[in-house]
Image (cartoon, rainbow, N blue to C red):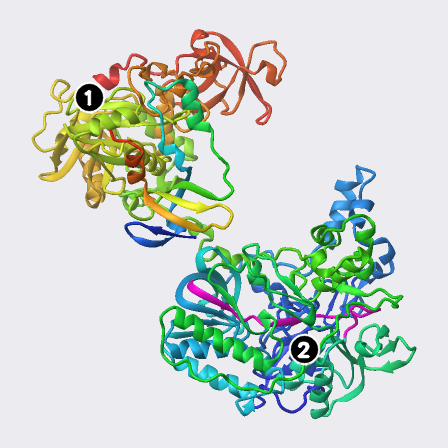
Amino acid sequence: MIIDHPLLGPRDAAEFVVKGDASLIGRPDGMTASPEDMHDYMYLRDNTAGEHRELWYHEQGDRSWLVVTRNTLTHEVTKVELARDVARAQGRSR
Amino acid sequence: MTQVNRIEGGQIDRSNTLKFQWNERWLSGHPGDTLASALLANGVKLVGRSFKYHRPRGIFSAGSEEPNALVQLRKGAAQEPNTRATTVELFDGLYATSQNHRGSLEWDLMAANDLLAPFLSAGFYYKTFMWPKAFWEKLYEPFIRSSAGLGRLSGRPDPDIYDHGYLHCDLLIIGAGPAGLAAALAAGRAGARVILADEDFCMGGRLNSESYDVDGQSGANWAALAVTELHAMENVRCMTRTTVYGSYDHGIYGALERKADHLATSEGKPRQVLWRIYSQRALLTAGATERSIAFGNNDRPGVMLAGAVRTFVNRFGVAPGREVAILTNNEDGLRTAADLKAKGVQIRGVIDTRKGETIVDTTGRKALKSVTLNNGRKISADCLAVSGGWSPNVHLTCHHRGRPTWREDIAAFVPGGDLPPGMTVAGAAAGHLTLAATLADGHESGARISAELGHANAPGDTPSAEDEPFETTAFWHVKESKRRAWVDLQNDVTTKDVKQSHQEGFRSVEHLKRYTTLGMATDQGKTANILGLSIMAEASGKTIPETGTTIFRPPYNPVAIGAFAGRARGKDFRYFRLTPSHKWAEENGADFVETGMWLRAQWFKKPGEKGWRDSVDREAAQTRKSVGICDVTTLGKIDIQGRDAAAFLNRIYSNPFLKLPVGKVRYGLMLREDGIAYDDGTTARLSETHFVMTTTTANAVTVFRNMEFVRQCLWPDLDVHLISTTDGWAQFAVAGPNSRPLLQKVVDDLDLSNDAFPFMACTECTVFGGTPARLFRISFSGELAYEIAVPTRFGDSMIRGLMAAGEEFEVVPYGTEALGVMRIEKGHAAGNELNGQTSAQNLGLGGMVSKKKDAIGSKLSERDEMNRDDDLRLVGFRPKDRAALLTAGAHFLRRGDPEDMAHDQGWMTSVAYSPELGHSVGLGFLKRGSERIGETIRAYSPVRNQDILVEVCSPHHIDPEGERQRG
C-alpha cells in the first residue's frame, strides 16, 4: 500500500504503524465523562465495509499521525490528512 | 548415450556441449537447453512418479505450468526439491534426480498404490482414517506423513543468499512474448520508464516456439532484434528469469528474479532477488496456457501438450518422439503436424475432435506405445500431442478478487472488467489468440498508456504478421473412455474424482477444489482447472460460467521461503543494537543477551567461576557491599520540552507531575487507556520547560508512539515537543555504598553530599574535566545509587573512566542478571509484573492513580473489577525451607486445598537467589496478598515438578524502609 503523506508525498505503508479507527481522536474528558462514555470510546468501533477513517503513524518517517480514509473493500486511499488538523477541526485544543 | 532425439534447428548453441547427471547417469546437452529438452534429446521419457498413485510420468509441457516433470536439483545443502525440469536452464555439471519413488524410478515399490486406486479416490482420507481412533497417532499419521510430499529437503541450512530489492517505473510489462515486446518497444520509444519482465531466460515467448514470421523475418529473429533495441534504451529495463508473481495494492508488484539458478555456483552473490516493483501502470501480457483433454490413460510418458511439442521441435531442436500422433479440438493440431513434418518427424495421425474422432485409451507402461481411437482403431505412437485449446493467463488480474468472464468463441475465461487499479491486459492474456492481433494489441496498449502518462514521442509502427486462422470447439473429456482419465496430473485427480465430488455434494468450485485437491498442487492447476470445471458443470447441468472459477491468489508460481526471508536469517533475522560499553564489555568477559532490540551484558565471568550463578552472586554482593556499575543506556529516553511540558506529562502519567520541582526526579506510572498498568520509569525536570523521561527497555518504542498520539491527536495545541534520545545518551547506573565517593572523583565541581544532592535529585553537570553529563540520584537496586549520562560518543571512555575511578573501591561491572536479582530483592516491579494484565492496584501502586486529574487510563482504572478488595496483590515470598529454590510460574494454593483452578490463589512472577539474604526470594501476585504477610502457603508447579511451602512477606526483601537509597 502507498499512503500519500500530506507533507512528504507518497510513502510505502511499510514505513507506517496503523492504530485503527480515527474515532480514537474523540476522547471524552476524563473528569466529566461517565464511565459508559469512556467505555464506548475505548471499546466500540464500527466495522465498516467501505470508506473507513483510520489512524496511521509515520514511525519510520516524520512521526506524523495521519488520518487515512481507506476503502476497506478495495484498499483505495481517497484522503490523507494530518491527524492534528483533524483533531483541531473537531474542536480539540489543549 | 548420445542425443538420439536431437534434430536440426533451434536456439541452442551446438558449438558447446554441457555434461549433466540425471539419476547418476552422465548425459549431454547444449547451452540454450532446459533440463527437459536435454532429457528428451537424450531419449529420456520417464522422469518421475505421480503424487498419489505413483504412476510413471513424463514431460508434459515446456514451461512453468509443468505438472509432471518435477525433479530434485543439486545435492547436499543446496538440494532443491520440486523444480520443474521445463524451466531449469541446463548448465555444465547440473545434477538432477527424480523423486517420489521408493527403489528406482523404473521399479517404484509404491506403485502398488495404483492397484489400490479404487480405494484411494477423492476424500479417502476422511473416510478411511476415521477409526479406530487410537490408530491415528501411531499408524495413520506416520504413514500419511511419510507418503506426503514429492521431493525431499536437505534438512540443512540453505547455503545461498537471497536479496530484496525495490524498483520504480512508469509501466511494468509482465511477459515478453509478442504482445509484451511490441508494447515495450512502443512505450520505450515514446519515452516511458519501462520494466519488461519475463520468467524465461530468453525473451520472445511463443515467438521462439512457433514458425511464424513477423515483419518479414522469423518470429524468433524479430524477438531478438526487439530485445536488442530495448537493451539500448536507457529508459527500459529488461529482466529475464523474472517471474512477476503477485499484484498488490496501489500498483505494487512482487517479482522473483533468479539470478544464479542457471549457474553451477552463485559464488557468494545472491541466488535470487525478490523485487518490489512500484508502477504507475502495469500491462499484463502473460500469454495463454494450453490445456489438455481428459481421456483414458492420458497420463503416460509421451503424452504432451501440442504447443510444448512445437516448442521442443522449433526452439530446442528436439523431437519428443519418433512417431507422433496429434489429438486436437482446434487449428493448432494441424500446425503441429506441419511443424513436425518440416523437421522430418513422422506423423501417425491427426485426430480432430471437431470431426467426431477421439482417443479412448492408450498403452505403454513407462512410455507411450499406442493410442486407441473411439472407432476402435489402434495407432502406434511414442508421442501424443494434445491440444484442448488455450486459456489466457488471467491469474494476476484476479489478485484483487477480480473475476474472469467466459468467452464462448474461444471457450476460455478472459480477464473481467474489475482489474487491479492501473492494470491493462493485452495480447493472448486478453483473449487475442492470433499473432497479428496480439502484436497490434500490445503495440497499441504500450503506445496508449505511455501517452496517458505524458510520454509523447513516436511509438513506431505496429509489427506486422499474418493473422492465422484460429477456431476451437470446446472439448474437455472423452465420455466413452472406460479407463481412468486424468484431470490434474500433479495431484492425481481423475474425471471420476470430479464426478464423485459432485455426487457427494461438494459442488461449488471451492468445495470441488478442496475435496479432490484439484488445482492445489504446486502448478495450481494451470493445465487442469478448466477441465475440472467443465466436468463439474456437465455433471450439475450448468454452464461453465455458471459454475465459475476458484480465486487465483499470489504467488503465480512458487516462490521459495528463502526469497521472502531475504537476508533476515540467523543472527540477522532482526537487527539489534549495541550498548556504548559493548566493546569494553567484550574485553571484560561479558556474556550477552538480547533484550528488546539490544544486546546487553548478562554477566561478566571471572576466571575460576564455574557457572553463571557464581558471577551473578558475586556482582550483586559486591555492588551491595561496595559499588557496581551497569550500562542502562537501553532504557527508553524521551526529551520533553515546551511551556506545557508539565501539563502534558500530567496527562501521560497517572500520578501528579505538575508540581515536580526543577532539579528533581519522580517515579511515574503510566496506564493504558483501558486502565491496565502499562509502563513505569523516572522523569527528571531539568528546567521549567525541559523534562527527561525514561521508559522500560521493552516499551521504549511504543511509549514514544503513544505520547506522540496524545500530543498530536488528543491535545494538539499543547506547547510540547518530543524527541527520542535513547541512542543519544550513554547512561550508567552506579550503585552501592561507595557510589558517592566514586562519582565525586568523576564529576567537576559538584557537591554530592546528601544535603547538597539528595535522593531523587538531578542536575546537568560536567565530568572528567568538561565532558557534558547529566546526573540523577535514582536507585533500582535499593542502594545509594546514581545514574550518570554522557553523550553516546563518550560512552566507551566513560565506562573506562568510571572503572578506573572505582578501582580503589573494588568496583564491579554488573549485568542484567545481577540487575534483576537486586530489583527482586528490593521488590521493584518489572516486565514480569507489568505484563499487560495487571492494574495499579495489583501492583500495590493504587495510591499513585490520582483522582484529581484526567490522565490516560485513570477513568477506566476506576472500574469495580479492577478495585476489588479480594484481588491479587504483589507481595514477596521466601521458601519455608531456606535451602529450597523458588520457581517462577508456580501457582499458590492454601495448604490442604486441591490442585485446581477453583482454588488458585495467584502465581509467582519473579524469583532470584539473594546473595545478601542467603536464600531464594520471590515476587508474585496473591489474592488479598497484602493482608496475608506471614502466612504459609503452597507454591505448586506441576510443570517444573515442584510443590513447596513458602512464606508470604513484604515485596521489599531488603531495606523495606529505604534507608540505604536515602543515605
| Snapshot quadrant of residue B811 | top left
Residue B779: in sight, yes or no?
no
Q: Write down the region rendered in magenta.
A: B279-301
* Residue marked by disc 2: B308
Q: Nearer the viewer, residue B625 or B426?
A: B426
Chain name for mark 2: B
Indicate yes or no whether the magenta region holds residue B135. Answer: no
Return the disc, 1 or 2, that comes first in the chain's sequence.
2
Q: Is residue B672 above or below residue B280?
A: above
Chain name for mark 1: B
Q: Nearer the viewer, residue B37 or B624?
A: B37
Residue B483: in sight, yes or no?
yes
Q: Residue furthest right?
A: B376
Indicate yes or no whether the magenta region holds residue B296. Answer: yes
Residue visible at 68% across and 87% down in the picture: B6
Residue visible at 34% across and 20% down in the picture: B826
Query: Which secondary structure lies at badge 2?
Result: helix
For badge 1, the amino acid type reads Leu
Query: Which secondary structure lies at badge 1?
Result: loop
Q: Position of residue B96 (x, y in %)?
A: 64, 71
Left or right of residue B268: residue B635? left
| Snapshot quadrant of residue B790 | top left
Residue visible at 62% across and 58% down in the picture: B153
Q: Nearer the viewer, residue B789 or B682?
A: B682
For badge 2, the amino acid type reads Ala
Judged by its main secondary structure, the magenta piece is: loop
Q: CA distance from mark 1 to mark 2?
A: 81 Å
Q: Position of residue B738 (x, y in %)?
A: 21, 25
* Residue marked by disc 1: B660
Category of crowding for the residue at label 1, using alpha-carbon neighbours closer than 10 angstroms: few (below 14), some (14–19), many (at least 20): some
Q: Position of residue B716 (x, y in %)?
A: 26, 34
